[in-house]
Image (cartoon, rainbow, N blue to C red):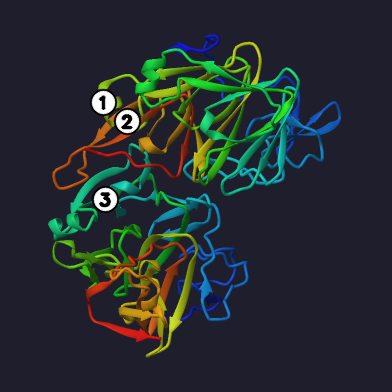
Amino acid sequence: MHAYSFAGTHRYGPHPPRTLSCRRGWNGSATFRGVDRIECQWCRVQNAPGTASCVSCGAPLDGKNLVSDSGWREAPRLRDMTEFRFANSVAQVEGELVPVTEIALGQGDAVYFEHHVLLWKDEATPVTAMQTQGGMKRLFGGMPFVLTLAYGPGRVAFSRDSPGELVVLPLHPGMELDVREHAFLLASHTIGYSFVRIQGLVNLLHGGNGMYLDRFITAGAPGLLVLHGYGNVFERLLKPGEKIMVEPGGFLYKDASVTMQAVQMPVKTGLLRRGMYLAEMTGPGRVGIQSMYVHHHAE
Amino acid sequence: MTAAPALPEGHTICHYCRMAHPATGTSCPSCGAPLDVRMAVTRSGWVEQPPIKDMARIQFGQSRVQIEGTYVPVADFTLAGPEWIYFSHHSLLWTEPTVRLTNSSLAGGWNRMLAGLPLIMIQAQGPGHIALSGDHAGELVALPLMPGQQVWTREHRFLTATGNVSYTWQSTGIWYNTGTGDDRETHYPLGQFGDLFVAQQIPGLLLLHSPGNTFLRDLAPGEAILVQPSALLYRDVSVSMHLHLEYPYGAQRISWRSSFSQRTVWLRLIGPGRVAVASVFGRTSSDQITGNSPATTRQW
């Protein structure tokens, strides 16, 4: 593993610890010191009464938590112009089909990103290059070996340039998340960045994910990670040992505690071809998938 | 498609799939179309197929499918007992390990391979969950089929069908050539082959992926409409079709290039029957046509 800033100790934690002692209501609301609070069903943060969207991730608080019969939960569809906060900064989501994330960076805050997702920025917003380790390996793997940092105060906006959904993941201290390469839109500077090489020849040849996964780690401070998924995004929480077979192109993110292995299925995909490979994901932890993907070749 | 059976008491007919369903409810149990939205009909008579609502369920046999998402919707099947579906391997998004996957080969493999069509289908048998995705922005269109009912669909629009729906394919017979000699190229604006689905002894379900939005129209006997060939999604087998070439007035003076042809290649559909088009389609070549399948022509 090649760490950018610091290596965090892994601790599985799909949801932040609840620091408030609260009593949950039937509709997801909670009472704290006699005041009704609204718990976000996506990131579990407590919100003030009367709030229309979560202050931490932007998820609508007046909508239903959509969970399929098979247990997949839809990522919340962020409303046009929704705002949410991290540290001293404010993010705003603009548009729905190919959504844009605009960040008003506060003093002392910074975000990093791959340069091709940059849509526009204020002239005065400073940017610097952020070298990642394993430069040549990353270059050969088609990954950027230089990320870009934008500092506050100032405004900067990002777009992945394709129809899809933004997945806002506030990360709490002690979390590790693996993300499909090129799927991350931005991360706040408090999140450590590294990458892991996908192990195993079968995984490399047939995994359909490329050679690397981006790994985001938080140690002492929380942070904000924004991903972009093609099409619609769904998340499922796997129990320890529970397995699900996923088309490798559909994989978007997972908790580091979830293991991923390419498995050959006993079916043919063509006249002379044998071997459709699927990614076997084994819990515990979250798995995120996207419904539109570039299908890998099954040869 | 043929007419729906006699209407039971307390039931109504779905505007879109023509199946009877209880008058209450928010979505059609046969095709998932929302029932609590007003039917949108253009002034020209096209009915807009409303997108299936997020998390709507469609029942077939002892199994059901739930439609999830809106941009690139996913069909999430709960397969009961021995019931099965078939699909091309490209469509598989995820599956539970309990679902049994096997192959079924298709006749005419060489021709299908040349046409870029799947040679082998995958069968998925329950019990368990399995999900498919059309992998492009658009809508899922569910077509419940009564026994003996047939429907023709454009190639590459098929997502999946239940095991009791038989599948065959036939040449479209719609083509044109451009260039001469070694430069001659044959174009199939509708695709080289079309898919034909027939429900067997019991009702079945066919799921299509429609890029963009979907519009339906019932053509009266002898009524004709011109559509972009690659926009056609499905049609009743009673609807006939052929190539139609339209040359606007003054088209020959547009370009000095002798190979350039300012014309539109249409698909002419003639009723009676239902047709459906998608709002996303491919463009046809602008090179001069040197040969074509039987076609009508209009010079303005």
Q: Amino acid at mark 2?
A: Gly
| Vertical arrangement, residue A259 with respect to residue B244, above or below | above
Q: Work out which quarter of the rendered image holds the C terminus of chain A and state it.
A: top left
- Mark 1 — residue? A202
Q: Is residue B3 visible?
A: no
User: Residue at the location (48% across, 70% down)?
Assistant: B215
Res. B183 image quadrant: bottom left
- The answer to whether the residues at label 1 and label 2 have Cβ atoms under 8 Å apart is yes
The answer to whether residue A237 is left or right of residue B276 is right
- The answer to whether the residues at label 1 and label 3 have Cβ atoms under 8 Å apart is no
Q: Work out which quarter of the rendered image holds the N terminus of chain A and state it.
A: top left
Image coords of residue A155 (percent x, y): 70, 31
Q: Chain of mark 2?
A: A
Q: Amino acid at mark 1?
A: Val
Image coords of residue A147 (percent x, y): 52, 22
Numbered tag placed on residue B123 in the rendering? 3
- The answer to whether the residues at label 2 and label 3 have Cβ atoms under 8 Å apart is no
Q: Secondary structure at mark 2?
A: loop
For mark 3, does the 10 Å Cα neighbourhood hold few (<14), some (14 to 19), or many (20 or more) residues? many
Q: Chain of mark 3?
A: B
- Mark 2 — residue? A207
Image coords of residue B234 (percent x, y): 37, 70
Q: Amino acid at mark 3?
A: Gln
Q: Nearer the viewer, mark 1 or mark 3?
A: 1
User: Residue most toward the right?
Assistant: A34
Res. A276 image quadrant: top left
For mark 1, does the 10 Å Cα neighbourhood hold few (<14), some (14 to 19), or many (20 or more) residues? some
CA separation in Å, label 2 and label 3: 22 Å
Please tell me if label 1 and label 2 are on a single chain.
Answer: yes
